Amino acid sequence: MQLDPLTRLPEIERDWMNAWIAKDRAAFEEILDDEFLLSSARGVLVRKPEWLAGAMSVFSCQEFEWKAILVRPFQHVALVHSTIRQVASVAGQDWSGVFMLTDAWVLRGDRWKVVSRHGTGPLPDAVA
């Protein structure tokens, strides 16, 4: 298995967001660490069980596009900074727009697992 974070993490990031669109719980379980915590762009902390429940129900994503991605490896940890555009909603409320994301990944044995995501946005049109 390819473990180089510079090539592997962008692949897993894409797999994760494709799983969100498809509502693929098995993929989520492979990607999210048990310690996963989302710092939502809406100001809410969401742990893995709550994120999974939402992703399988009220979190809906129709489109997800990577605008930029930067991987910063630090031995068994890596940070992934990205700018994305999404068409999404939560419980019927529009969450579409351009966002900045920072994901923290750890190498657990022979697998990269995401332990944290922080989202900022939607960004103003002038920035996006």
Image (cartoon, rainbow, N blue to C red):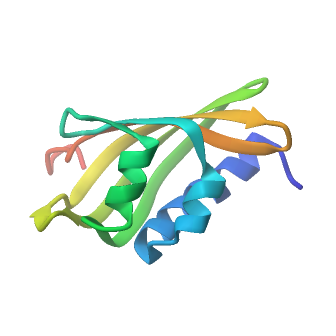
Q: Position of residue 71 (x, y in %)?
A: 62, 38
**Horizontally, is 78 left or right of 115 in the view?**
right
Above or below — where is 77 with respect to 126? above
How many marks the image carries: the answer is 0
Q: Which image quadrant is residue 118 in?
A: top left
Say if 83 sits above or below 59 in the image: above
Residue ID at (78%, 45%): 111
Name the quadrant containing residue 12. bottom right
Where residue 41 sits in the image (x, y, percent)?
A: 24, 39
- Please give the name of the residue rendered at 85% of the width and 43% of the height, measured from the top-left corner: 110
Instruction: Choose between 36 and 99: the one closer to the eye.
Output: 36
* Left or right of 107, for residue 115: left
At x 62%, y 52%, the residue is: 31
Quadrant position of residue 42: top left
Task: Farthest residue to the right: give it.
Answer: 1
Location of residue 31 with respect to 82 vertically, above or below:
below
List x then y, in percent, for residue 22. Answer: 46, 77
**Location of residue 109 in the rendering, given as x and y in whole percent from the top left corner:** 84, 37
Q: Residue furthest left?
A: 93
| 52 on left or right of 103 | left
Quadrant of the rendering where the N terminus is positioned: bottom right
Residue name at image x 25 percent, y 50 percent: 128
Residue lying furthest top: 74
Image: 75 above or below 116: above
Asked if residue 72 lies left or right of residue 44, the reply is right
Foreground: 57 or 22? Answer: 57
